[in-house]
Image (tube, rainbow, N blue to C red):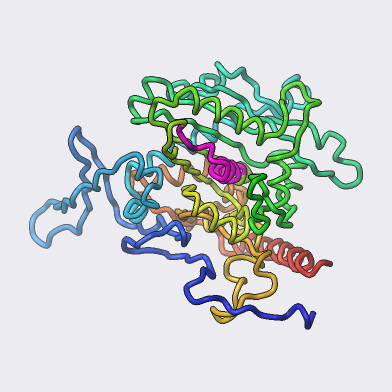
């Protein structure tokens, strides 16, 4: 251990920790430095946003005047107009997050609903012939879950089989492929409305036992997606990597690894619409957001987000309740490749703090100068973060629930505060948070033993 305590000097200006800002005013944001913005300040004022054909006007209620019997309203300028490229992070969402721009809010909710469709369509009935698969065919899926008007057509279902073994023989069906989500493309009418042909990949989150086990495989492994330039320092969580890359040809629904299915389908759609303006949007919840980020990095690393005649197709990841995926080198490489990531998190959601509860952005250096021996094993978040803050007494699981995330975002549109439930009983709150503290302590202990090679 004494020999392992050798320190390296961090060069001045080198990235050290993830910056977390509870911003009250617009900040200069760079994709090289993930930034946390809080929606609580957006909803702290009672604001009503009304729209017309020409402008969006925000009215802020002010205190009643000392004389007169009516309440005056102070009009503030409408939010600045923005392009779809800006909404998808072309300028790292600078000026759109704090305060949250109505167009960006609508886009976040729209993609959140498209991810929620995965849960509504997933068959969890062991007696069903479609167990662990989608309940509906591709053409009917969005209509069957009540989303017929989204303007997207599903082109392919995505399947994955994590290469993990559950303890005590419980993992006999662990390698069975299961439905993870879908690829869809905007219809002609929707493409005209959006201003581009949007290729969407939507991933559900963790449901089965083997997927939960994959989530807790917190060891970092080299991604090595580009054989010509493997970049061994770029490391990602081994469980997510296994789910993304493991092959399974034994199941009637699957056709190889999740990765191969996705790269093939997206390449096909890009070639099909090569003469149009295209965007690639990847959205996921929980574990699904990790797959979305891996896919975004993979596409960019291999150059598959390029038009045949030159030019780059933008890649944007909308992450809901997503965990950390890789180390600082992974984050830096995503930034270099231009993969834009908007992370929507609940400050009370423990999943967004894992893996890397102990070894994360803040544990890489000592005194801001000395790189610690385990720095390469530290996880780092990618992208710009939009922070929610909610907790419901008696329903602790809601802190990670996708629909709860969407509901909190929708509350922003009518000015309701995005904050923790104030009706919680003090004793109940203390008990539940005490339970969380013990669980997080156990996770920290496991990460420490793993880092020490125990």
Q: Is residue 165 above or below residue 346?
A: above
Residue 119 appears anywhere in the view: no
Residue extending farthest to the left is 68
Looking at the image, which is closer to me, 445 or 311? 311
Measured along the vertical axis of the image, is residue 317 above or below residue 138?
below
In reply to whether residue 151 is colored magenta, the answer given is no
Can residue 124 be seen from the camera position used here?
yes
Q: Which residues are magenta?
A: 291-307
Q: Position of residue 333 (x, y in %)?
A: 55, 54
The secondary structure that most of the magenta stretch takes on is: helix
Q: Residue at x 13, y 59 (%)?
A: 65
Say whether residue 21 is left or right of residue 331.
left
Q: Is residue 81 above or below residue 353?
A: above
- The quadrant in which the C terminus is found is bottom right
Q: Residue 332 versus residue 27: which sits nearer the camera?
A: 332
> Residue 28: horizontal and vertical position, in percent?
35, 62
Q: How many marks?
A: 0
The image position of residue 397, as x and y in percent, is: 62, 48
Say which of 12 and 48 sits in front.
12
Q: Is residue 226 above or below residue 1?
A: above
């Amino acid at each position: 251990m004494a020999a392992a305590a050798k320190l390296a000097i961090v060069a001045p200006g080198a990235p050290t920790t993830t910056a977390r800002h509870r911003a009250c005013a617009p900040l200069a944001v760079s994709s090289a430095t993930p930034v946390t913005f809080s929606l609580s300040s957006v909803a702290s004022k009672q604001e009503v946003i009304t729209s017309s054909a020409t402008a969006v006007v925000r009215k802020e209620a002010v205190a009643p005047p000392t004389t007169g019997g009516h309440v005056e309203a102070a009009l503030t300028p409408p939010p600045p107009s923005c392009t779809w490229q800006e909404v998808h992070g072309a300028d790292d969402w600078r000026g759109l997050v704090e305060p949250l721009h109505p167009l960006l809010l609508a886009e976040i909710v729209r993609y959140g609903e498209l991810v929620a469709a995965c849960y509504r369509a997933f068959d969890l009935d062991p007696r069903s012939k479609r167990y662990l698969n989608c309940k509906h065919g591709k053409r009917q899926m969005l209509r069957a879950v009540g989303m017929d008007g989204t303007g997207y057509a599903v082109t392919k279902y995505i399947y994955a089989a994590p290469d993990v073994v559950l303890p005590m023989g419980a993992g006999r069906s662990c390698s069975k492929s299961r439905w993870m989500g879908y690829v869809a493309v905007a219809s002609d009418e929707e493409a005209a409305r959006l201003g581009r042909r949007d290729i969407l990949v939507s991933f559900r989150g963790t449901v089965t036992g083997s997927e939960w086990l994959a989530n807790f495989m917190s060891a970092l492994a080299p991604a090595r997606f580009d054989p010509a330039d493997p970049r061994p320092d770029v490391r990602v969580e081994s469980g997510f990597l296994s789910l993304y890359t493991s092959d399974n040809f034994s199941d009637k629904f699957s056709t190889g690894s999740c990765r191969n299915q996705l790269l093939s389908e997206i390449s096909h759609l890009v070639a099909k619409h090569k003469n149009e303006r295209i965007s690639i949007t990847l959205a996921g919840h929980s574990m699904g957001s990790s797959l979305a980020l891996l896919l975004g990095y993979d596409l960019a690393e291999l150059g598959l987000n390029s038009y045949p005649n030159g030019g780059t197709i933008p890649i944007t990841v909308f992450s809901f309740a997503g965990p950390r995926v890789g180390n600082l080198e992974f984050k830096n490489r995503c930034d270099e490749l231009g993969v834009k990531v908007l992370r929507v998190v609940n400050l009370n959601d423990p999943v967004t703090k894992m893996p890397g509860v102990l070894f994360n952005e803040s544990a890489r250096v000592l005194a801001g100068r000395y790189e610690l021996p385990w720095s390469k094993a530290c996880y780092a978040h990618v992208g710009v973060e939009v922070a929610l803050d909610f907790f419901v007494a008696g329903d602790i699981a809601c802190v990670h629930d996708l629909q709860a995330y969407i509901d909190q975002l929708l509350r922003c549109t009518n000015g309701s505060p995005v904050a923790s439930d104030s009706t919680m009983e003090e004793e109940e709150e203390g008990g539940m948070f005490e339970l969380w503290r013990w669980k997080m302590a156990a996770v920290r202990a496991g990460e420490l033993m793993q880092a020490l090679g125990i």
